[in-house]
């Protein structure tokens, strides 16, 4: 694992960097997840000669968890843009899952001249709504936040979502809360509308168990290529990493 110091701060993000001669693929994880937790097995199944970079966002996984940082999509995008510039990555493929997809979309908007392909897996495109994890975390009682957050984690664990809970426990609660609030409010410019405007190849991956979904047809109408991972739902990196890797490979 390597680390990168964010410009103008003492904060460090940490990332896995697997050698490859072809275009680097940068993986951006979703809420409660981590690149180092989600995508190592997927990377091992890819079987391609691309450089693969798995990032733990600030506040998550093995990266620093400063209390003074404001955990919003745009500020994650800011340091990731600098990270890509400082690594001298001239052409890149961006992958983003769930709320990490919103980060990926805004990052592609800032670095459009460097983007070869955008791959999204069940990305946030619109403000989060009732029933989603981000909506639930965004509505945790701030007056008793620590206890309320721990109670919510216990509920997720009791429901059987133990893999996600394992990763979520390594998040700074403030980071999970502020990212969730941003998910509920949506982007300053609609993530969906930004996606539709991109001219480079753009893919959207569904887990088979997440279908039917209205976006299956809607996205195709706007030039987004749809792929489906069999025997998996939203957490496809854990549920079926081998077939997930095969689908990603088709997008490259």
Image (tube, rainbow, N blue to C red):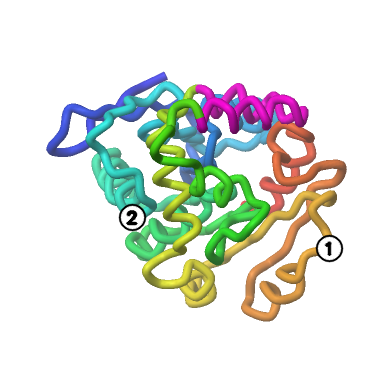
Up/down of 249 relative to 147, above or below:
below
189 up-or-down from 80: above or below? below
User: Which residue bears the numbered disc 1?
Assistant: 212
Residue 165 located within the stretch drawn in magenta = yes
In the displayed structure image, the side of residue 250 where residue 55 appears, left or right: left
**Based on the displayed image, in which of its 4 quarters is residue 17 positioned?**
top left
Q: CA distance from mark 2 to mark 1?
A: 31 Å
Helix, strand or loop under label 2: helix
Quarter of the N terminus within the rendering: top left
Q: Main secondary structure of the magenta part?
A: helix
Identify the residue shown where x is 62% and y is 79%.
222
How crowded is the residue under tag 1: few (<14 C-alpha within 10 Å), some, or many (20+)?
A: few
Label tally:
2
Judged from this view, the residue extending furthest toward the right is 231
Q: Residue at x 53, y 23 (%)?
A: 169
Q: Which region is colored magenta?
A: 148-169
Is 162 in front, or is 82? 162
Residue 196 is left or right of residue 82, and the answer is: right
Along the line of sight, the residue nearer the viewer: 199 or 9: 9
Vertical relation: 6 (above or below) 136: above
Image location of residue 108, percent across then percent down: 41, 60
Q: Residue at x 73, y 33 (%)?
A: 241
The numbered disc on residue 178 is none
Decide: is 187 above or below 144. below
Residue, far top = 1
Among numbered discs 2 and 1, the one appearing first in the sequence? 2
Q: Position of residue 53 (x, y in %)?
A: 46, 34
Q: Give the residue pinned by disc 2.
A: 74
Residue furthest front as drawn: 143
């Amino acid at each position: 694992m390597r680390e990168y110091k964010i410009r103008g701060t003492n904060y460090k993000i940490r990332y896995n960097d697997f050698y490859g001669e072809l275009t680097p693929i940068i993986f951006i994880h979703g809420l409660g997840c981590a690149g180092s937790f989600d995508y190592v097995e997927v990377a091992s199944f890819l079987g391609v000669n691309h450089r693969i970079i798995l990032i733990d966002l600030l506040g998550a996984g093995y990266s620093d968890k400063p209390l003074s940082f404001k955990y919003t999509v745009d500020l994650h995008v800011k340091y990731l843009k600098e990270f890509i510039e400082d690594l001298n990555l001239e052409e890149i493929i961006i992958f983003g899952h769930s709320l990490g997809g919103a980060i990926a979309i805004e990052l592609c908007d800032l670095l459009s001249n460097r983007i070869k392909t955008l791959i999204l897996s069940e990305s946030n495109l619109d403000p989060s709504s009732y029933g989603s994890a981000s909506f639930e975390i965004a509505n945790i009682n701030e007056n008793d936040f620590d206890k309320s957050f721990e109670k919510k984690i216990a509920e997720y664990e009791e429901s059987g979502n133990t893999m996600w809970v394992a990763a979520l426990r390594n998040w700074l609660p403030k980071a999970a809360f502020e990212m969730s609030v941003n998910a509920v409010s949506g982007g300053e410019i609609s993530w969906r509308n930004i996606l539709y405007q991109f001219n480079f190849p753009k893919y959207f991956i569904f887990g088979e168990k997440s279908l039917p979904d209205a976006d299956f047809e809607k996205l195709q109408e706007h030039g987004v290529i749809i792929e489906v991972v069999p025997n998996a739902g939203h957490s496809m990196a854990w549920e079926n990493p081998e077939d997930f890797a095969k689908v990603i490979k088709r997008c490259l």
